[in-house]
Amino acid sequence: MSPPNSFALGTFGHADRELAGLVIGDRVFDLGSRLQPGTTVRLLLEDWDAGFDAIRRLAEELADAAGDFELSELQPLPPVRPCGQVFQAAANYRQHVLDLIAGAERRGDDSDGMGEGGNREDARVVLDERAATGRPFVFMGSAHTMVGAEDTVVLPYDSEQSDWELELAAVIGRTARRLPPERALEVVAGYTICNDLTSRDALSRWDASSLGIDWLAGKNSPTFLPTGPLLVPAAFVSDPMDLRIELSVNGRTMQDETTADMLFDVASLISHISTVAELRPGDFVLTGSPAGNGASHGVFLRPGDVIESSITGLGAQLNRCVAEAPPGEGEGALASNASWAKR
């Protein structure tokens, strides 16, 4: 159940224009006409303390008002446009890692990213040691992969192992450097949903195995980061470590787990990132994906598949998969997404 007077933010497409919206239930209010023209969610994040106060007052004024739009009338875009840096936690759910290893062992492939000669038994031991005394593993992804919660997912023509990875994402609202874990959540403006898709068969490089996993090739295909539909302020998410993550493909449940299975909680991830880099408003911290990925089920995405996903209190996504046209066969399936996704 949502807290009283709760609201969310979103960015939406409507009638060839883009608008920042205040979302109260199923009603959407155009922030540009109520705050000032040109208001965007990203601009609100730049001074989140003032922005949140202004939106909260506005939400109280509009609590009983008719919306400018119904949520169903609008095309959901990624809620923060443009977003900042995208930080992505790897192997941050214990059962997820164990399932990936088991699936790769059954199939005899390297979809867990270990490649030839990887010692999977050692990996199991290291997993427990890392959770007890180690640090999170975080890499960076391209913001250009980001599309909306209902946009088409384009499966690369040269990959046979396109996989889903539904994740809780924390969106940063204050600049942060070297934060202790006990203060890390103070810089979170809100939370949203990201499906951080992976080309499993691109992770391991035969020609560069000593250099580790190829995150560029595995994670950054266009449309591989459906995001949103909503940015829910942190004030309305009572415990980010007690949210249910659910994903189905063609109606079959694949992921159904809670954020409690994280090896490193949201605060630990943010603290770690801030000791290495500077976090700024508009940055995304993806917190890892729980058990139930395609690599563990032995099932990968194919053209025509429909992915439905949700996280408690943050809304839902519905994405249809299409094939990318090989080079020389037209513009490719990216053209099937609305122009919003490519701005």
Image (spheres, rainbow, N blue to C red):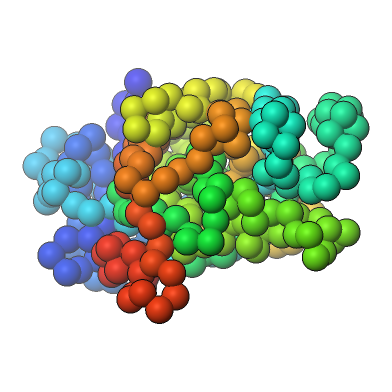
Q: What is the quadrant of the C terminus in the image?
A: bottom left
Picture layout, residue 183 above or below residue 35: above
Between 264 and 294, the one nearer to me in the picture: 294
Percent of width and height locating residue 144: 49, 67
Residue displayed at 38% across by 57% down: 323
Would residue 187 appear left or right of 40 to someone viewing this image?
A: right
Percent of width and height locating residue 99: 67, 28
Percent of width and height locating residue 166: 50, 39
Q: On the image, which quarter does residue 43 sit in?
A: bottom left
Percent of width and height locating residue 190: 48, 44
Picture layout, residue 120 above or below residue 154: above
Residue displayed at 56% across by 29% down: 297
Q: What is the quadrant of the N terminus in the image?
A: top left
Residue displayed at 67% across by 43% down: 111
Between 285 and 222, the one nearer to me in the picture: 222
Picture layout, residue 112 above or below residue 219: above
Between 232 and 224, the one nearer to me in the picture: 224
